[in-house]
């Protein structure tokens, strides 16, 4: 909450109406990614803004802006009931003193657990368990995670050769009752929020109706009306005197901009290569230029500087227009703790 009482950061929840699919970089139909990455979120919002007649204005305010982007998005993470899960900071996960739980198997961890670990309180292993299929740390008495991986069969009928049918199975995520996905939306400042909040709400509402991710023509990726709430990140304790540094915990994928002064010799981070195909009325389906990005959960050191990130043109040579992959940083400040 800003001093004037104006929110510039929100959490947005999506309650799925059916299966969702996030295609893996391999493109395999029988595999599914467990996370909807922030660059894909940005691409989906760009598509929605174009349908709303705001495409060029949106790109000028974000991907092409020399200042901070008007809005940025975290990746989509699961929630279950009132519990929001997230990719935890690599610098504190898995906790080294945990012996009963196979913590390395948990890709998503409740925010309350992250906050407890940041405060040096450890984890109550009698309370939690790892759900193997969803890779979520869940309360011991819940029994199952927020989603399951399923294979849905369908068939393609050859319209030219009578009787020729090809069947295949497509992997998807099927969500439990009172579970779904959530993201963080951050606006650059009050002016950006005042101008773009209602428009981003409209874009998300359009996407909730039309679908996120793959197999949208089958009705996948749709949700109930998105639920917006003011976003307050986990409260990090004050850094100890012997370790006063603050680090940046990434909730999004990240592409460093030329002005971001990251200390790459330190920190705790991982990379992944993002690929994908272009959705454009000009030349549909062409392959984007692969992009190496810093992964969610990474912890970076950059002094007191706020990380910005950038959007990069990933269109192949000769493509008629830019195709932006967003790597704007959505971060939470946490104390830096070097691995033991």
Image (cartoon, rainbow, N blue to C red):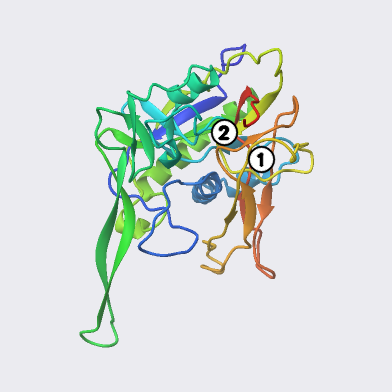
Of helix, strand and loop, which one carries label 1? helix
Above or below, comparing residue 211 to residue 204 in the picture: below
Please state, as top left, top right, bottom left or bottom right, where the N terminus lies in the image: top right
Q: Position of residue 276 (x, y in %)?
A: 53, 61
Q: Position of residue 197 (x, y in %)?
A: 53, 31
Query: Would you say 185 lies left or right of 326 here?
Result: left
Above or below, comparing residue 59 to residue 28 in the picture: above
Please state, as top left, top right, bottom left or bottom right, where the C terminus lies in the image: top right
Residue highlighted by disc 2: 196
Residue highlighted by disc 1: 61
- Residue at the location (51% across, 61% down)? 279
Above or below, comparing residue 32 to residue 41 in the picture: below
Q: Are marks 2 and 1 in contact (CB under 8 Å)?
A: yes
The answer to which of marks 2 and 1 sits earlier in the sequence is 1
Residue 148 in sight here: yes
Residue 80 in sight here: no
> Within 10 angstroms of label 2, few (less than 14), some, or many (20 or more) residues?
some
Q: Position of residue 183 (x, y in %)?
A: 47, 35
240, 311: nearer the viewer: 240
Residue positioned most to the bottom: 161
Q: Position of residue 215 (x, y in %)?
A: 36, 58
115, 193: nearer the viewer: 115
Point out which mark residue 41 bears.
none
> Within 10 angstroms of label 1, few (less than 14), some, or many (20 or more) residues?
some
- Residue at the location (50% across, 22% down)? 117
Residues under labels 2 and 1: Cα distance?
Answer: 10 Å
64, 245: nearer the viewer: 245
Above or below, comparing residue 24 to residue 177 in the picture: below
Of helix, strand and loop, which one carries label 2? helix
């Amino acid at each position: 909450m800003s001093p004037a009482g104006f929110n510039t950061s929100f959490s947005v929840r999506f309650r799925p109406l059916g299966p969702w699919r996030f295609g893996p970089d391999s493109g395999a139909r029988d595999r599914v990614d467990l996370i909807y990455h922030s660059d894909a979120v940005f691409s989906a919002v760009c598509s929605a803004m174009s349908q709303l007649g705001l495409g060029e204005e949106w790109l000028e305010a974000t991907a092409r802006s020399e200042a901070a982007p008007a809005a940025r998005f975290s990746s989509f993470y699961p929630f279950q009931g009132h519990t929001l899960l997230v990719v935890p900071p690599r610098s504190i996960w898995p906790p080294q003193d945990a012996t009963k739980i196979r913590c390395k198997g948990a890709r998503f961890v409740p925010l309350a657990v992250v906050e407890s670990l940041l405060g040096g309180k450890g984890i109550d292993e009698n309370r939690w368990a790892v759900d193997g299929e969803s890779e979520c740390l869940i309360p011991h008495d819940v029994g199952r995670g927020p989603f399951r991986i399923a294979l849905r069969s369908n068939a393609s009928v050859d319209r030219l050769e009578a009787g020729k049918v090809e069947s295949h199975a497509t992997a998807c995520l099927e969500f439990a009752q009172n579970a779904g996905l959530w993201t963080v939306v951050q606006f650059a400042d009050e002016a950006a929020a005042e101008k773009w909040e209602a428009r981003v709400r409209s874009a998300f509402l359009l996407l909730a109706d039309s679908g996120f991710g793959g197999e949208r023509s089958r009705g996948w990726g749709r949700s109930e009306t998105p639920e917006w709430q003011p976003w307050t990140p986990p409260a990090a304790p004050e850094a100890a005197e012997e370790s006063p540094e603050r680090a940046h915990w990434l909730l999004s994928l990240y592409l460093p901009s030329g002005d971001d002064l990251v200390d790459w010799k330190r920190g705790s981070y991982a990379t992944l290569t993002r690929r994908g195909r272009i959705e454009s009325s000009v030349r549909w389906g062409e392959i984007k230029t692969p992009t190496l990005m810093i992964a969610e959960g990474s912890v970076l050191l950059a002094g007191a500087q706020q990380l910005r990130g950038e959007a990069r043109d990933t269109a192949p040579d000769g493509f008629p227009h830019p195709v932006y992959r967003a790597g704007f940083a959505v971060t939470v400040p946490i104390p830096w703790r070097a691995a033991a």
